[in-house]
């Protein structure tokens, strides 16, 4: 629920940054880091052992036995690192844009 409200308020605040907008570069940075974090969240969840065990429970066939999945899975820690960096970049760009955390 919180991420949905965050997304909606961001869309209402910026929409797609326009070329003449003086804040367009920082809006693009915030949007880019958010998109990167969303992609990396998908990569982290899809390369997680818990997700593989859940799939095995429902389908009866473990994806870990697949060589392609295993080569994707072994970089799970790297996906976490990229996710943390994307979230930190999103918060840093947001802080640069608004100055202080609203609240």
Image: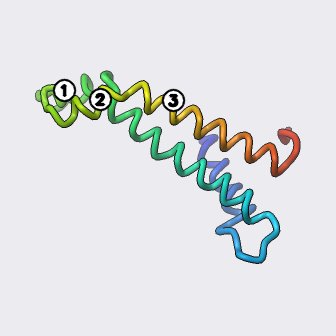
Q: Earlier in the sequence, mark 1 or mark 2?
A: 1
Residue beneath the point at 13% across and 32% down: 66
Number of the label disc, if any, that sits on residue 73? 2
Q: Quadrant of residue 51?
A: top left
Q: Please name whichever residue, 61 or 18, is drawn nearer the observer in this view of the structure.
A: 18
Q: Earlier in the sequence, mark 3 or mark 1?
A: 1
Q: Cα distance, mark 3 to mark 1?
A: 22 Å
Q: Cα distance, mark 3 to mark 2?
A: 14 Å
Picture layout, residue 95 above or below residue 64: below
Position in image of residue 53 (x %, y %): 25, 22
**Residue that label 1 marks:** 64
Residue 25 lies left or right of residue 74; in this view the side is right
Residue 66 lies left or right of residue 13; in this view the side is left
Neighbor class of circle 2 (other Cα within 10 Å; few <14, some 14-19, many 20+) is: many
Q: How many marks?
A: 3
> Of helix, strand and loop, which one carries label 2?
helix
Residue beneath the point at 84% across and 42% down: 102
Number of the label disc, if any, that sits on residue 81? 3
């Amino acid at each position: 629920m919180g991420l949905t409200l965050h997304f909606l308020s961001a869309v209402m605040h910026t929409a797609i940054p326009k070329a003449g907008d003086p804040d367009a570069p920082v809006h693009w940075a915030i949007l880019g880091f958010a998109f990167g974090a969303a992609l990396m969240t998908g990569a982290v969840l899809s390369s997680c052992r818990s997700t593989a065990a859940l799939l095995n429970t429902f389908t009866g066939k473990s994806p870990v036995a697949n060589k392609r999945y295993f080569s994707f899975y072994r970089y799970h820690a790297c996906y976490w690192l990229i996710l943390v960096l994307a979230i930190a970049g999103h918060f840093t760009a947001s802080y640069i844009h608004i100055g202080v955390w609203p609240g």
